[in-house]
Amino acid sequence: MGEEGFSSDSALLYHRGVPSAIVDAQVWALPDLSTTPNAPLLPRHLRLPDLFPGEDWKALDAVTGRRLVLGNGDVRISYVVAGESSPLYRNAVGDECVYVEAGAATVETMFGALAARQGDYVLLPRATTHRWVPTGDGPLRAYVIEANGHVAPPARYLSRYGQFLEHAPYCERDLHGPGEPLLVAGTDVEVLVKHRVAGGIGGTRYVYATHPFDVAGWDGCLYPYTFNVADFEPVTGRVHLPPPVHQVFEGPGFVVCNFVPRKVDYHPLAVPVPYYHSNVDSDEVMFYCGGSYEARKGSGIGQGSVSLHPGGHAHGPQPGAVERSLGVELFDELAVMVDTFRPLELGEGGTACDDGAYAWTWAGGR
Ligand SMILES: [Fe+2]
């Protein structure tokens, strides 16, 4: 498999069977991927845990159970709480970057298995056949970023030959690839494929003559891997540093940043929470996945919440947050942020868990 017409990263996979031998194909009806505009244009608070009440998760898997929260023509963000193993699946639309909010899983792939745990980003290159097998006692909670192209470390972190530079907040040591080949035998094996169709995304359910995990070994630099957010070394300063210092990945039409527990601005007169700002070319999506997010205190935002701050709207700390942050030395907060360059629309999941009140919190809830 090769990217960009085999003029970029590639891998040679040594299958025992013929990887193109299909014996059946049917349409796979995808979950609802429709979106509605953010109109009137509002900042929003989406309570993702509300999408999976009670014990619903026990019967769901991390692929077919996803509910679309936000999306545009470049990227789709969904959320799932799962307890079952997923079908075999591959996304031929683009790379998937899956953040494990809680729980644990083995991600079996045709390259071998990845162990995924809380705080891991799981990077699955486009068209990597895989399945999610939850392994923890509790639910697997996953925040899924689906791109239309490739998700990778920012180019500015890399040398012209591809090595991480010393100023990058993580390096090769922090990336964990697949283990030994799985060498699974089987016949008539079903695989769900999400793929491009004219003007959108379609699904096909294939049956393969032999198992796609029949790979004896592989070579190359294109493979799935994990990166744990705890291995991101935060960059800090005497005064406020802008969001690019928090960047972890980039994809076509968006970036991924993370806000990790860190020492905060240490100038004697610094205000540790960020100033009010207008990110004029982006929609900002924050997923609050640990600790206590200082700037949002008083807004109702909690673990598993998402905030959407659209371009065209200034945002910043909730009332009282500036004063409370004065003199603080550490923020114990964890959030994953996706900034998109095209406007986001609400998926059915996003609409279903919108708290409807967040937009008015800066004015004291009036
Ligand atoms: Fe912001």
Image (spheres, rainbow, N blue to C red):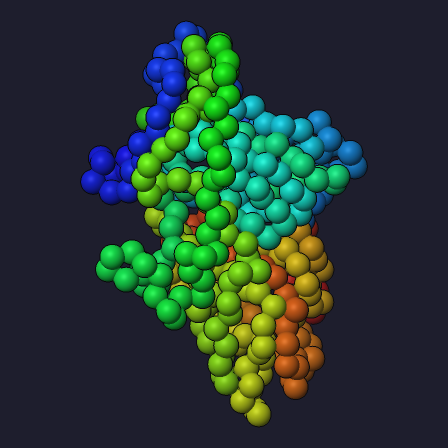
List the single residue furthest toward the bottom. Answer: 268
Instruction: Examine the image and state in which quarter residue 321 appears.
Output: bottom right
Front residue (pair 34, 56): 56
List the single residue furthest toward the right. Answer: 54
Residue 62 left/right relative to 130: right
Q: Is residue 22 at least partly visible in the picture?
A: yes
Q: Position of residue 51 (x, y in %)?
A: 68, 39
State the residue at coordinates (28%, 35%). 2
Q: Position of residue 203 (x, y in %)?
A: 45, 22
How many tags in the picture?
Answer: 0
Q: Position of residue 11 (x, y in %)?
A: 32, 35
Q: Is residue 308 at least partly visible in the picture?
A: no
State the residue at coordinates (56%, 70%). 316
340, above or below 268, in the image: above
Residue 113 left/right relative to 13: right
State the residue at coordinates (56%, 23%). 87
Q: Position of residue 309 (x, y in %)?
A: 52, 59
Instruction: Examine the image and state in which quarter residue 157 appears.
Output: bottom left
Quadrant housing the C terminus: bottom right
State the residue at coordinates (39%, 11%). 22
List the single residue furthest toward the top. Answer: 23
Residue 126 left/right relative to 46: left
Front residue (pair 74, 318): 74
Instruction: Examine the image and state in which quarter residue 291 appears.
Output: bottom right
Quadrant housing the N terminus: top left
Front residue (pair 134, 359): 134
Residue 187 left/right relative to 303: left
Front residue (pair 33, 108): 108
